[in-house]
Image (cartoon, rainbow, N blue to C red):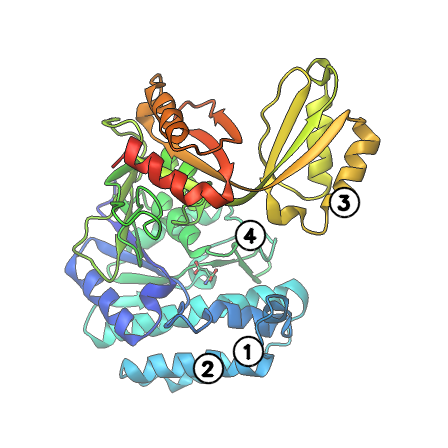
């Protein structure tokens, strides 16, 4: 342990001057907060796009928004980026006109291909960190920007989905020796050749996780706009509370099933060194948030229920398929060929089902079915659309099947049709597939029965 807190602030926490002032107060309040990782400005209002999306739009000559049917041109994106940063600079009372000049010249980069996309995408974090560090310094905090290209956050040359190289670790660890607060842009690193490469979207969380690991932080604080991880989607279950403590394993199961808390891969570096991740709300710093740990006492059965919508279920029947060695492998390799991720595949003597994200079937189901029929010759094949999967999660479920029984009984009493049941091999969660039309009602029944 190093006596250091690594504090990462997400896009909404640094979206404008008002939010940046909240960040400053949080950082100033605790002298352990010596490494601050920041995202690019997120949406300042619900009608606005994220700055990073504007940057992707510029980088892709307008394809980025066009593909999402958002009518914003490259010129409009360029103006949005410059206007947003100049507004932040003005509102913070900074004299940083040189930064704007440098931003304008970066936006006119003559890089090409993926190098260009990565470089432009990284500019939101890059300039935001420089502005925030300048603001901290103006407020008489001993703070300095530390740029990945300067301290050596070395990454692989997969420009748009990069990974940190081992040789970056000592460079990052050296940040712990600085006697000023380091303000670091998230989301990107530099390749051996000195090019910028970015992590996948939401990747500032990853920067924070990797830094927390390298400096062996006491805790990785992840500041966002919610007060932690909720027991169930609070838009559907008004009484859902935040969960005080969760294990890495539980959060992974909750996150992979529709809880969008933070970048899943950001956890691994913290998990490795048992560094707790504390999810906190920049707008309500008094709230306790959720702490994610390697271990906790399982006081209750179910801690949270995730809901994954827009799921489809492909059912295949073939005499003795369960006894044909390699049948599942062949089937899944067809899904792989079509780039379709499969979530579960319950199987039996003559049947197998594959649960997938329904949107992955758009434009592919016809060819997928054709390929499966010609290659595997099933006796019957059928696709069930519009399902939701409800996933109760909790360490306390291990060796305790009562909540499964209670869940099924409660759903049965309310005549909720169940399309699928699957217990995770870890035994700390189970999945219930129901038709989408009754999924919200089913979630409420499960919440009342298992948590509320
Ligand atoms: N700005 C990047 C994105 O929008 C990374 C991040 O915010 O974590 O994906």
Q: Badges 2 and 1: C-beta atoms under 8 Å apart? A: yes
Q: Badges 1 and 4: C-beta atoms under 8 Å apart? A: no
Q: What element carries label 2?
A: helix
Mark 3 or mark 1, whichever is nearer to me: 3
Mark 2 or mark 3, whichever is nearer to me: 3
In the foreground, 322 or 237: 237
Q: Residue 181 in the image: x percent, y percent?
A: 26, 61
Q: What element carries label 1?
A: helix
Q: Residue 366 carries which label?
A: 3
**Number of other residues with Cα within 10 Å of mark 4, as a class: few under 14, some 14 to 19, many 20 or more:** many
Measure how far apart labels 1 and 4 are at the Cα level.
22 Å
Q: Name the residue under label 2.
A: 82
Q: Quadrant of the C terminus?
A: top left
Measure how far apart labels 2 and 1 are at the Cα level.
9 Å
Q: Is residue 13 visible?
A: yes
Find out if the beta carbon at label 4 lies less than 8 Å from the nearest ligand 1 atom.
no
First reached walking from the N terminus: tag 2 or tag 4: 2
First reached walking from the N terminus: tag 3 or tag 1: 1
Give the left or right position of residue 37, taking residue 67 as reference: left
Measure how far apart labels 3 and 1 are at the Cα level.
42 Å
**Number of other residues with Cα within 10 Å of mark 1, as a class: few under 14, some 14 to 19, many 20 or more:** many
In the foreground, 17 or 413: 413
Q: Which mark is residue 107?
A: 1
Q: Residue 208 in the image: x percent, y percent?
A: 37, 52
- The residue under the point 53% across, 71% down is 55
Tally of numbered tags: 4
Q: In which quarter of the image is residue 355?
A: top right
- The residue under the point 39% across, 83% down is 86
First reached walking from the N terminus: tag 1 or tag 4: 1
């Amino acid at each position: 342990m190093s006596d250091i807190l690594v504090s990462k602030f997400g896009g909404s926490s640094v979206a404008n001057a008002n939010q940046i002032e909240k960040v400053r107060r949080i950082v100033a309040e605790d002298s352990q907060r010596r490494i601050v990782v920041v995202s690019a400005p997120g949406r300042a209002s619900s009608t606005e796009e994220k700055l990073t999306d504007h940057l992707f739009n510029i980088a892709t000559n307008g394809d980025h928004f066009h593909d999402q049917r958002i009518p914003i041109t490259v010129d409009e994106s360029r103006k949005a980026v410059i206007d947003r940063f100049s507004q932040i600079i003005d509102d913070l009372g900074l004299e940083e006109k040189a930064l704007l000049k440098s931003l304008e010249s970066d936006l006119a980069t003559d890089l090409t291909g993926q190098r260009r996309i990565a470089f432009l995408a990284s500019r939101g974090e890059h300039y935001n960190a420089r502005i925030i560090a300048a603001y901290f310094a103006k407020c008489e905090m001993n703070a300095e920007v530390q740029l990945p290209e300067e301290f050596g956050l070395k990454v692989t040359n997969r420009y748009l989905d990069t990974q940190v190289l081992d040789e970056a670790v000592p460079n990052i660890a050296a940040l712990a020796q600085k006697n000023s607060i380091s303000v670091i842009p998230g989301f990107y690193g530099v390749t051996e050749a000195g090019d910028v490469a970015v992590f996948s979207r939401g990747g500032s969380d990853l920067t924070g996780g990797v830094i927390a690991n390298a400096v062996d932080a006491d805790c990785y604080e992840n500041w966002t706009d919610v007060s932690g991880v909720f027991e169930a989607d609070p838009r559907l279950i008004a009484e859902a509370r935040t969960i005080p403590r969760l294990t890495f394993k539980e959060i992974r199961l909750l996150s992979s099933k529709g809880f969008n808390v933070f970048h899943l891969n950001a956890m691994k570096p913290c998990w490795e060194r048992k560094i707790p991740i504390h999810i906190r709300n920049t707008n309500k710093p008094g709230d306790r948030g959720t702490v994610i740990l390697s271990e906790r006492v399982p006081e209750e059965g179910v801690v949270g229920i995730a809901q994954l919508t827009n799921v489809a279920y492909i059912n295949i029947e073939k005499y003795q398929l369960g006894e044909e060695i390699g049948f599942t492998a062949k089937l899944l390799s067809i899904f792989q060929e079509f780039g379709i991720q499969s979530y579960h595949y319950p199987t039996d003597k003559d049947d197998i089902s594959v649960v997938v994200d329904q949107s992955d079937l758009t434009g592919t189901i016809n060819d997928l079915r054709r390929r499966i029929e010609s290659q595997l010759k099933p006796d019957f094949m059928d696709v069930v659309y519009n399902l939701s999967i409800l996933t109760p999660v909790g360490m306390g479920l291990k060796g305790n099947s009562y909540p499964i029984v209670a869940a099924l009984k409660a759903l049965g009493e309310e005549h909720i049709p169940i399309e699928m049941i699957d217990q995770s091999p870890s035994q700390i969660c189970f999945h219930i597939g129901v038709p989408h039309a009754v999924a919200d009602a089913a979630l409420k029944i499960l919440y009342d029965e298992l948590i509320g």
